[in-house]
Amino acid sequence: MGSAFKFINEENPKKAVLLFHGLTGSPFEMKKFGKFLSEHGYDVYGACLPGHGEFKDDIYTVSYEDWVNYASEQFEKLCEEYEEVYLGGLCLGAVVSLALCEKYQEKVKGAVLLSTTLYLDGWRLPWYACFMPFGLHTVFRYYYQYPECEPYGVKNKRVREIVKKALAKTDGGMDTYPMCAFHELLELSQDVRYDLDVVTSPLLIIHSREDDLASKKGAEEVYRSVSSTDKELIILEDSYHMVLYDNEKDFVFKKSLEFLDTHSANLKTEAVTA
């Protein structure tokens, strides 16, 4: 579907990472991150959620159940091929990853949650955002589009210009947020929040203090509510929403790899001990 990608290692590592992009984005935004993880020993699959990628017009017809069902299919396929399957997601992708953690529990060997968007309460949203819940539950949501605008989720001005140009291309995602997409994201987030306590998978949660789309409230709620005994919450101080491209991207890449390597090593140790 769409612009899905994969990076496969010839040495057949038996461990894979399934990545999910953000709302109205595309797998392209996860590609550098995926290549980095692949170069360090993981097979990486970048999924394209329904209504995204090459099929942007479908965003008006898909539901959050379509996102979760598609993600579940991709996860189950990988579980048949690999001994270890990890998840990673940005924005909507992080929420979808949490939904899979709730559904599959111990099958998910670990999840990297970036800019988890359980709430649309970032500082960039317009003053009238407080009225959004009223419009989301009416036919109005199919007609209004909230335009993507400065700072495009990026604090670094040079990178911001690159992102701005990328939005004009097919791979860069949409240049607007249809309100119906907001509606489905918030419906999914509500369902996920209700069952956070069933999550037991190891989690790495990374969120920016200055996230312009979603405040750190959602990330803190995840950390506080899940039952995972192995969890870490990191708050970035010099980034906005798009943490894989902003000032602290190298740190995010490094911490994500450390998280995956640590849990992969632990699984190998447990297997040998057993």
Image (cartoon, rainbow, N blue to C red):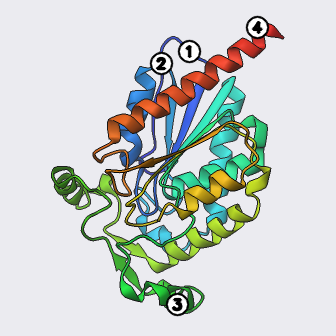
| Residue at numbered disc 4 | 272
Quarter of the picture containing the C terminus is: top right
Secondary structure beneath disc 2? Answer: loop
Mark 1 near mark 2, Cβ–Cβ under 8 Å? yes
* First in residue order: circle 4 vs circle 2: 2
Is residue 70 something one can see in this rendering?
Answer: no
Residue 37 horizontal/vertical position (percent): 45, 28
Q: Amino acid at mark 2?
A: Asn
Residue sticking out furthest to the right:
274
Residue 154 horizontal/vertical position (percent): 28, 56
| Residue at numbered disc 3 | 135
Q: Residue 9 got which mark?
A: 2
* First in residue order: circle 1 vs circle 3: 1
Task: Please identify the quarter of the rendering in which residue 86 is found.
Answer: top right
Q: Is residue 224 left or right of residue 177?
A: right
> What is the CA distance from the residue labelled 1 to the residue labelled 3?
49 Å
Secondary structure beneath disc 3? Answer: helix
Q: Is residue 40 left or right of residue 263?
A: left
Q: Residue 12 got which mark?
A: 1
Mark 4 near mark 2, Cβ–Cβ under 8 Å? no
